[in-house]
Structure formats: structure tokens, C-alpha cells
Amino acid sequence: MSLELSRNILIGQYIPGATLIHRLDPRTKILCTLFLLFAVSFTRSLTAAVIYLVTILALVGLSRIPIAFVLRPFIRGLPVILFFLSFSILYLSWFQPGSLILIDWGFIRVTSEALLQAALSLVRLMSILLLVSLPTLTTRITELTHGVELLLQPGARIGLPVHELALVITIALRFVPILTEELERVIKAQASRGGEIGELSWKQPRQIAQSLLPLVVPLFVNAFRRAEELAVAMEARGYLGGRGRTKFIQLHGTWIDLIVTVAMLVFVAGVWYATSGRWL
């Protein structure tokens, strides 16, 4: 287990840039992300999933963020992912008969349909990890918050607490790197006292579980302390919710945002329609 946890957590981090992806309106990025998330999560076609993944990687390339940097968390967890996928293949091969049997050796059986579903799950997981990270890597948290609030604004007519929901999303995104830094600090403190958690690998699950127990309590204590400090700071500044508040950052969509949003919707729907009802 690495001591440099913050290097493997991308959610909440922002990489400045002047690319087209960076300049797009946050609402455009949120809508395009939702379109792709829906398509990736519910497609049953491996071909469609691969097309969506290639599209997401192309978007990462357009934002000029190194592919290796974005894929680092996935690569770090790949052994564990493959471990669970292996069990999934064995389970599906036995309890979903009817497809072509590729391997039949004792209790080990592998079918073509099980392999297809495992490959689909792997591509889907990689796509979701990239999609969740890309908006925060190319957009400041405050701009994402304003984008979410403006997209939810029609819900205010039916009593939806739009500003509060946007605030919750902001705090959640901001606390991901903060809690990661807190956990990294606690791990380093344990290691300086002779702990070996930084030297353990995924091949030692029992030792990792035993080493993680002393980290849970201080991590929760630090998290509650941070939350209390935030609440005190908001009260000291007279925060009363969204009543009477104005925005320092004003979002203005352009025709490019409209074209990108419509093009993404048409692309997702077209791939979905062309590959619907097929596994490949």
C-alpha cells in the first residue's frame, strides 16, 4: 500500500489549462458527462462500451491531461479488479449455461458469454472512473457548483433546495482530497512509529485489514474536526443559505457549448441504437 495516496485520487483535483475542454461551460461538461455515464452504465454491447471508452480517452487527450496520470488509480487497483473478475467469470460460467464452453477442467469452467460480460464490466469500470474524474480535472470546483445549481434551478419552483444541494456537492468534492491528505498523514505517522502499512501489498489482505484498524478512528476524528471548523467558519461569515446571495462567477454559454451538447447527445444515442440488443 503506497504512502502517497493523494497521487492516486483524482476526484477534486484541478489541472489548469487553456484547451477547448477547459473553456467549455461547466453545464456543458456536466450534461455530456451524464449522457456518457448513462450510456456506459446501461449498455449491454461490448462494442458500444469500447466506443464510449475510446471517446472518453479522446476527450482526455483533447484536455492535454496525460493518459498515464488519469489511468494511474485504475492501474494501481488492476490486480484486485482482475481477482474479482476471475471469480465473476467462474460464477457466470456455471450458473448461466447455454453459451460456448471454452474451458472445462474439473470445477473450472469458462464460457464465451462469461468472458464477454467480464470484459464489458472491465471496460465499463474504466470508463466510469475516467468520467467521474474528468470534469473536476478540467473545471474548478466553484464553477462546477454554479453549473449544478443552474441546471437544478427549475426544481426550485417545486421547493427543491437547489442552493443547498449544490453546496453539499461542493463540500463532498472538496473533502475527497482533504480526507485523502488526512489519511496519508495518519499513515505516515503510523509508519514513523514502526508500522508497516506502507510496505504491505494487496497479496496480504489479512495484514492490511489489521493495519487499517488503527487508522479508522483518527481519520474519523480528523474528518469531524474539519467539518466542525467549516461549520464555524460559515457561521462566522453570516452564511444563511441562498437567500439574497449573488454570484461572483457568472456563467455564459456560447454556441460552441450548444453544438457540443447536441453532438454528444446524438453520438451517444446513435451508438446506443446501432448496437442495441447485441452483446458484441
Image: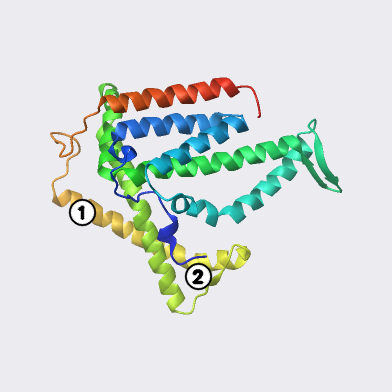
Q: How many marks?
A: 2
Q: What residue appears at the point 23 percent right and 51 percent down from the top-left corner?
A: 231
Relative placement, left or right, of 207 versus 59 is right
- Residue 168: image quadrant is top left
Q: Position of residue 260 (x, y in %)?
A: 36, 27
- The amino acid type found where label 2 is placed reads Gly
In the image, residue 32 above or below residue 190: above
Relative placement, left or right, of 25 versus 41 is left
Task: Specify few, some or many for label 2: CA neighbours under 10 Å numbering under 14, 14-19, or 20 or more.
Answer: some
Q: Is mark 1 on a helix, strand or loop?
A: helix
Q: Nearer the viewer, mark 2 or mark 1?
A: 2
| Residue denoted by label 1 | 232
- The amino acid type found where label 1 is placed reads Val
Relative placement, left or right, of 77 versus 277 is left
In the image, residue 115 above or below residue 276: below
- Residue 209: image quadrant is bottom right
Q: What residue appears at the point 46 percent right and 25 percent down from the top-left corner?
A: 267
Q: Where is residue 83 in the image (x, y as percent from the top left)?
A: 65, 52
Q: What element carries label 2?
A: helix
Q: Residue 198 carries which label?
A: 2
Q: Where is residue 195 in the image (x, y as percent from the top left)?
A: 50, 75
Q: What residue appears at the point 38 percent right and 46 percent down from the top-left corner?
A: 64
- Residue 186: image quadrant is bottom left
Q: Are marks 2 and 1 in contact (CB under 8 Å)?
A: no
Tell me if residue 74 can be seen: yes
Measured Cα–Cα span from mark 2 to mark 1: 35 Å
Tell me if residue 152 can be seen: no
In the image, residue 62 above or below residue 216: above
